[in-house]
Image (spheres, helix red, strand yellow):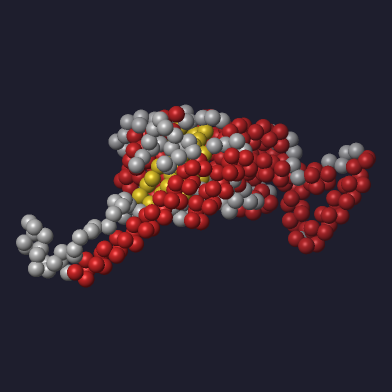
Amino acid sequence: MTGVAEGTPAGLSGLVTGKSVIVCCGSGGTGKTTISAAIGLASATQGLKACVVTIDPARRLADALGLDNLGNTPRRITGAWAGELSAVMLDAKGTFDDLVVRYSQSREQADRILQNRLYRNLTSALSGTQEYMAMEKLYELHSEGGFDLVVVDTPPTRHALDFVDAPRRLYSFLENRVFRLVLAPTRAYLKAVTFAANALLRTISRVAGSEIVEDAIAFFRAFEGMEAGFRERARRVEDLLANPGTAFVLVVAPREDSIDEARFFTRRLAEGSIPVSALVVNRLLPNFGTDLPTGDVPSAAQPPAGTPDLAPPDPLAYEELRSNLEEFLVVARTEEQYVAELAGEVAPAPVVRVPFLKDDVHDIEGLQVVARHLLRGN
Ligand SMILES: Nc1ncnc2c1ncn2[C@@H]1O[C@H](COP(=O)(O)OP(=O)(O)OP(=O)(O)O)[C@@H](O)[C@H]1O
Ligand SMILES: [Mg+2]
């Protein structure tokens, strides 16, 4: 029993046709980028108009997806599939710039923000910005892109749910109280607080340098009037993540550390009332069967029937292969145990297995192999 509910279709075919957003998450290096690209391809194969938002794909995969020139808008990938496949490589800074332009009240206000030094460092300095911009891009493509399905890859995060929490954290930064008090000390009773805030700023200036504080004040001043638009947008992004049309696909490696993180991740999602819609176990050992060959080592004097021209088997080499296989079977059993444990936690979500392929997945052919495993289930 793997925890798959009765009647749940094997593979991801149901998910791919029934959802409009798929978020691929999981810990670092488990295959999120690969699996999200393969889900996009699987959807196109099924006749959907799909778009994949990838984050920092390996160079060769980016080339295969036609993303060689950095672009923050979807590129259509040509191929012989029933639907359409587009891909976009997330440019967090470009996405943030677009948001600023969208919500500023004038071009001058947008320029003041875009040229501000603090703002220019914000995407790299402020943790969670990349996570939020991935979600923002997802929202934009979902609401304005005309796609049936948008699949989004997520950045490797230290804390599994950074990208779900990111909208709120970013906006609470933008609404920073200290700066608000310094900028708008309009009422008399705020004077005392303002005095305290100014004292704090003087301390920060001494430690971090007055330029930084000036940049920050200029930044928050330039931002005046835009908070409402930003807050509303963040709320809509959060709503989209909680929408039943959004599926979270958890990608794991069949290793203890990855399974532990996935378990933590699943619980955190559950706390936010977000169920895991499918579990993809990536890079499983291929299925070698379950039993070791029994019987005698074929003897040198008696080659197996029908193979008179083959060199006689070497009993030592045979023993070595046999013990190799034995080790593989032990590892495969351990992997299956991990999978079964996690499957129980995400039940009734389907569990989809993708084997460890011979080569890295770096082109459309490789993605097609993964896509077949995802759709078929096994
Ligand atoms: N089933 C597989 N068989 C063989 N190689 C694979 C498989 N899945 C992924 N890979 C390879 O493993 C590497 C890591 O995969 P990928 O970049 O998709 O992981 P990731 O989770 O996105 O990593 P990161 O957290 O760093 O973004 C890539 O080189 C990819 O081609
Ligand atoms: Mg990745």
Place of residue 237 in the rendered image (x, y in percent of width and height, measured from the top left):
60, 35
Pick the residue in front: 297 or 248. 297
Q: Residue at x 40, y 36 (%)?
A: 12
Residue 67 seen from this side: no
Residue 294 seen from this side: yes
Pick the residue in front: 26 or 103. 26
Place of residue 341 in the rendered image (x, y in percent of width and height, measured from the top left):
48, 47
Which quadrant of the figure has residue 41?
A: top left
Q: Residue at x 74, y 35 (%)?
A: 225
Q: In this rendering, would 289 be left or right of 313?
A: right
Quadrant of the snapshot with the N terminus: top left
Pick the residue in front: 1 or 191. 1
- Count of number-bearing discs: 0
Place of residue 239 in the rendered image (x, y in percent of width and height, measured from the top left):
61, 32
Q: In this rendering, would 41 be left or right of 228?
A: left
Quadrant of the snapshot with the C terminus: top left
Q: Residue at x 84, y 41 (%)?
A: 184
Furthest toward the front, the residue is 295
Q: In this rendering, would 238 be left or right of 344?
A: right
Q: Residue at x 67, y 32 (%)?
A: 232
Place of residue 286 in the rendered image (x, y in percent of width and height, measured from the top left):
32, 52
Q: In this rendering, would 172 be left or right of 95?
A: right
